[in-house]
Image (cartoon, grey):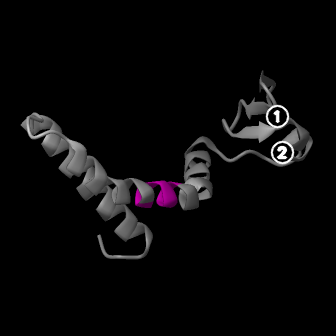
């Protein structure tokens, strides 16, 4: 296991990049780190529930944002808002097992 970088109460593993509570460092150091390609996927999978929840909240917030934008809003900003809405909708649909 490589040296660790201290960042407050957490440390970052130099091999896999995962942030670990200092009290859990010994246990993490005792296990082999994920490889570079597998480490990213493992971190995304671990964060998936929170990412899905964040996407759902953001998607639910889009109508509020849409209603509060002024009529004089630039078309480019309107397009970006609708693009974000579409991307969030597709991402949450896929995450819940829907077809792509």
> Element under label 2?
helix
The residue that appears at 22% across and 49% down in the rendered structure is: 66
> Element under label 1?
loop
Badge nearest the viewer, 1 or 2: 2
- Residue 9: give x, y in percent of width and height: 81, 31
Q: 23 or 70, which lies in front?
A: 70
Label for residue 88?
none
CA gap between label 1 and label 2 equals 9 Å
Rendered image quadrant of residue 92: bottom left
**Span of residues in magenta:** 51-56
Give the position of the N terminus as an image quadrant.
top right
Q: 26 or 94, which lies in front?
A: 94
Q: Residues within 10 Å of mark 1 (few under 14, many from 20)?
A: few
Q: According to the image, label 1 marks what residue?
A: 1
Q: Are marks 1 and 2 in contact (CB under 8 Å)?
A: yes
Q: Is residue 28 above or below residue 72?
A: below
Q: Any magenta on residue 6?
A: no
- Residue 85: give x, y in percent of width and height: 26, 55
Give the position of the C terminus as an image quadrant.
bottom left
- Residue 54: give x, y in percent of width and height: 48, 54
Describe residue 80's horizontal placement relative to residue 23 as left or right: left
Describe residue 85's horizontal placement relative to residue 39 as left or right: left
Q: 66 or 30, which lies in front?
A: 66
Q: According to the image, label 2 marks what residue?
A: 28
Rendered image quadrant of residue 93: bottom left
């Amino acid at each position: 296991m490589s040296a660790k970088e201290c960042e407050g109460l957490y440390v970052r593993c130099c091999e896999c990049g995962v942030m670990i509570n200092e009290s859990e460092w010994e246990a993490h150091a005792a296990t082999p780190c994920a490889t570079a390609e597998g480490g990213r996927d493992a971190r995304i999978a671990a964060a998936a529930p929170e990412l899905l929840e964040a996407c759902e909240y953001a998607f639910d917030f889009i109508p509020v944002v849409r209603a509060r934008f002024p009529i004089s809003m630039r078309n480019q900003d309107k397009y970006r808002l609708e693009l974000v809405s579409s991307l969030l909708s597709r991402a949450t649909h896929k995450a819940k097992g829907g077809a792509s």
